[in-house]
Image (cartoon, rainbow, N blue to C red):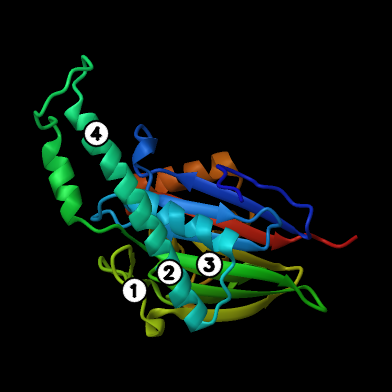
Amino acid sequence: MSEPGVGVGAGTGVDVHVYRVPATPECPEEWRDAVAVSGDRRAFALCDGASSAFRAGPWARLLAREYVTEGPDHSPESLVHWVDRCREKWSEREAERRKGNAAAAVMGADGQETHRRPADFWLEDAEARGVAKATFLGVRLRPAPEGWSFEAVAVGDSCLLHLRGDALLRAFPLGDAALFGSHPDLLSAAEPLAADRIHHYRGRLDGQDTVLLVSDALAETLLTHGHTGAGPGAAAWWQVVRQVDEPAFERLVTELREARAIERDDTTMIRIRPRPEH
């Protein structure tokens, strides 16, 4: 399993690259997006921790890691049970973390026992009332008689964009920029997942196809300018994301932010492409 900053390689018939630009470049520790890629490059996850939720980044990372390592199938029953297992692991880890914090608060900096509340007690109190939440997008890739097939599942507004050449074939689970909002559906660490909230998509890849897993702010921008009815300029947007490298991706996001064409949020993209056959 990998959570890299840039390309994670080829070697299994597909090229996979991960690109990320934090909302606040000088504070990368505040990163709330999470990416995971399985070692065989057959499973991919992108999760976006809710900015309004406490410890959303760690929850998003747990979901992404568990998806590519546990390998739940995409049946509703399997996914519901998988989320329950993730919630159990989260509860156990949070209990241990809070226990450690409590022990540290009792022991002063000089090693002497103290019963004073830490200076950031207000944060701990607020955290105790908060619930970690994140969007979830998972994709599994399989060899097919001709090319590749893939299955995707999603809760929330992290999107899969299926391209053929420089044209958009399908956007999933949101197919229009107008569908994005400030209150996406989220996987909660405190609530079970209802099966009817899970979205499913299946597709096939040929040699001209690209699959992008994209966090919400960039997905909305790409769908605004690259949708089928956007005119001849639409293809240029898809050309950029199909060919972009790490420095170019950072420049793209920075320029969009400066032009106020994209929300200042953690911005993440996984690009998956079949390797040309020789």
Label 2 element class: helix
> Crowding at label 2, few (<14), some or many (≥20) Cα neighbours within 10 Å?
many
Vertical placement of 102 versus 232: above or below?
above
Query: How many other residues sit within 10 Å of disc 4, few (<14), some (14-19) or many (≥20)?
Result: few
Sequence-first disc among 1 and 2: 2
Give me the residue at 34% from left, 73% from top. 192
Residue type at mark 1 is Pro
Can residue 132 be seen here? The reply is: yes
Is residue 264 visible in this depiction of the protein?
A: no
Q: Amino acid at mark 3?
A: Gly
Q: Indicate whether 39 appears above or below 187.
A: above
Outermost residue toward the bottom?
Answer: 196
Q: Residue at x 57, y 42 (%)?
A: 246
The residue that disc 3 covers is 138
* Sooner in the amino-acid sequence: mark 1 or mark 4: 4
Question: In the image, is residue 55 above or below residue 144?
Answer: above
Report the residue marked by disc 1. 192
Residue 24 appears left or right of 141:
left
- Mark 1 falls on what kind of element? loop
Whether pointer 1 and pointer 2 mark residues with C-beta atoms closer than 8 Å, the reply is: yes
Mark 1 vs mark 3: in front: 1
